[in-house]
Image (cartoon, rainbow, N blue to C red):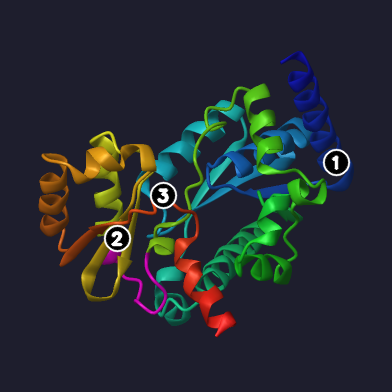
Amino acid sequence: MPSESADALQLAKSLVEHIRTSYYKVVVAFSGGVDSAVVAAAAYRALGTNAIAWTSIGAAMPQADQLDAQRVAQSIGIDHVRIPTSEIENPDYIANGPDRCFHCKSTLYAAISKWAREHDFETILSGTNAEDLGDYRPGLQAAANWGVQAPLADLLYTKDNVRSIAKLWSLEVADKPASPCLASRIAYGQVVTIGRLGRIEAMEKWLNSEGLSDVRARLHADDLLRLEIHLHQLPEAVCEPMRSRIVSKATELGFRYVTIDIQGRQCGSLNRVLTDAQKG
């Protein structure tokens, strides 16, 4: 354990020094997740009041994540700006093609850039880490278009590296699971609406309240709800009385069909159709 702490300390020092020597006034695109929290904390340590955390308040950001972002920014001490964004008004975003994330991030970075210019901030920082670069993330192209910098990726920090720094700095989100936006739960080609986002959020919130943690409620065609639940909790979910309660809640929220995926909880499962299309 001492060596792990020493490693985390060196990683943290290198990150702070990288930001201190590379940037002057920065705006951190801040979701409240562990990656952006570590970048925000490092930026505040490096630059003080020349670092700002900037959170987009959009229809696809769960309320719980909004509250996490406020609380974490306060614990770091960094000034925190919360601005509504209008991606839900963009037809290309609503259409929900494979490039949805590109249009979402383009809206986000355009809004941050406008704010930054108006308040004399120079650079946008993101929480992108080295592992993100190998995944299908069209939002990275939007970041490149807007000149967004990614200090974690620059230093080749992995998710484990980031979590170790978060634990060193006692950030409450150190062990928080990844929490992509609610639109990522909607299958490609199914339009994004405020109503659908709200139903997905309500279903996941209810499941969490029932003790089924870190669940994904995926919406497919014909109002089919596909639930991804961690394997160790599958027996509880498919047995009575929980099975009937899940069906009842899903029906109440307007889902026509409900199924539990026996493959369990997966990351990016909706991207599988893109891989299959490339193979075909």
Residue at position x 30%, y 52% in the image:
201
Considering depth in this image, is 260 or 207 the residue closer to the camera?
Answer: 260
Determine the main secondary structure of the stretch shown in magenta.
loop
> What residue range appears in magenta?
186-196
Residue 202 position within the rendered picture, expressed as x and y whole percent measured from the top left: 25, 50
The tag on residue 226 is 2
Residue at position x 58%, y 81% in the image:
279
The tag on residue 18 is 1
Residue ID for mark 3: 265
- In the drawing, does residue 161 fall left or right of residue 74? right
How far apart, in angstroms, are the residues tagged by discs 1 and 2?
43 Å
How far apart, in angstroms, are the residues tagged by discs 3 and 1?
36 Å
Give the image quarter of residue 112.
Answer: bottom right
Considering depth in this image, is 131 or 46 the residue closer to the camera?
Answer: 131
**Is tag 1's residue or tag 2's residue first in the polypeptide sequence?**
1
Classify mark 1: helix, strand or loop: helix
Amino acid at the residue labelled 1: His
Amino acid at the residue labelled 2: Arg
Considering depth in this image, is 90 or 190 the residue closer to the camera?
Answer: 190
Q: Callout 2 environment at 10 Å: few (<14), some (14 to 19), or many (20+)?
A: some
- In the drawing, does residue 169 fall left or right of residue 211? right
Farthest residue to the bottom: give it. Answer: 280
